[in-house]
Amino acid sequence: MTHAGVDVLLRELAPQVVGAVARRFRDVHGAEDAVQEALLVAASRWPDEGLPDDPRGWLITVAARRMNDGLRRETARRRREVTAASSEVNGAAPASDDSLTLLFLCCHPALTPASAIPLTLRAVGGLTTAEIARAFLVPEPTMAQRISRAKQRIREEGARFAMPTRDEWPGRLRSVLHVLYLIFTEGYAASSGARVARSELSAEAIRLTRKLCASLPDDPEVAGLLALMLLNEARRPARTGTDGELVPLAAQDRGLWDTELVAEGVTLVSASLPKGAVGEYQLQAAIAALHDEAATADDTDWPQILALYGLLEQMTGNPIVTLNRAVAAAMVDGPKAGLALLEGLEERLPAHHRLDAVRAHLLEMDGDREAAIANYRTAAGRTTGEAERNYLLTRAARLAPER
């Protein structure tokens, strides 16, 4: 088997193996480290020696041995060593897949998103600390510390390796969906650095959400989140130009969009909406579907999008939703209607570049070139993404009078 094939297999098996070992040893921190060692051994051996008959069982056995070796070295934990030894994992892989339980544990409500995201990518996604650090443009030791602190916080909370109880379920599932959404968002529209997007993060978010959707096929919000990701991901090929520059939605070549992802996303959101109370991810997916189903930018059903943003704003109270509703209002009722909705948002979005960018866009629509230029430049100075900064400065430059 090739190195690339082994890497794909190991990434798929990693969360299952971490879950199996963590469940038996009751130690997610130690299990995650032990499995990383087992993965390194497998990555070096399997391409040359071939796959074992049971790759998952092989990894569990090697990781369990690492766990037992560590326990034996720590004499202060003799009681834990006895417990672990009595339940030592043999070469046969357990029938259950604990990756869903592991996902819920990594997205524990006690963790901030900044902690939960890298922990999820490491333990459930199978990414190395170095890969995660590169994705978020921080030094590897910094990311290692962040992941270590997240594990420590989970231990301090006394979190059990078990699925949430009936009472815990709503809050815990909400935390999981939020973390997956943030991972996708960072991958789809990178918040810093020179790249427009980080495809490795959005791809991982989609993979994990697919697994969650397969485990919870009747949950409409899980389906809504997956639909939202797919409908946005479908536009990726058209989001950058030949020189890597950002291309806004209205200017994208829709012939480059992935029609299979669009169809899958539309099917998912269409099936999820009638299942009862509609959630925020379903509404966002419905808006994305309206954009993706329009043959051209001029064919976009802006009145329907405006109505959906109104519902979403009532549901969430999120100022970013208000910002998006202002754009929809401008497309339906003119730029002044959109600008009116921006009043008062400065306090809720202080120094946020998107507020300045949207205001600039609406002022440009309204014919106020000087104010639009000033706001584009302010937005460019506030964003941390190089591609977005270049786009905003280009917009300003195009409006500036020739000298």
Image (cartoon, rainbow, N blue to C red):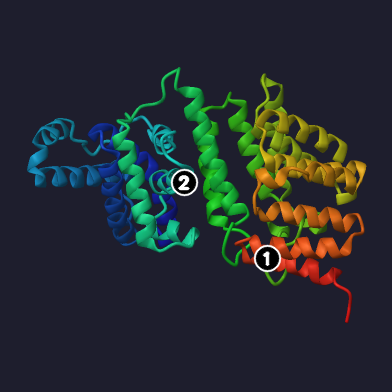
Q: Along the line of sight, which residue is nearer the eye, 63 or 333?
A: 333
Residue 268 place in picture, x, y as percent:
67, 33
Question: Is disc 2 surrounded by few (<14), some (14 to 19) or many (20+) residues within 10 Å?
Answer: many
Q: State which quadrant residue 398 falls in.
A: bottom right
Q: Which element type, helix, strand or loop, lies under badge 1?
A: helix
Q: Earlier in the sequence, mark 1 or mark 2?
A: 2
Q: Which residue is mark 1?
A: 389
Q: Which element type, helix, strand or loop, lies under badge 2?
A: helix
Q: Along the line of sight, which residue is nearer the eye, 158 or 234?
A: 158
Q: Which residue is mark 2?
A: 117
**Residue sitting at 45 percent across and 53 percent down?**
8
Residue 221 place in picture, x, y as percent:
61, 29
State whether residue 300 appears in this view.
Answer: no
User: Taking 374 as reference, is 230 left or right?
Assistant: left
Which residue type carries mark 2?
Ile
Residue 187 place in picture, x, y as percent:
57, 53
State whether residue 303 appears in this view.
Answer: yes
Q: State which quadrant residue 254 falls in.
A: bottom right
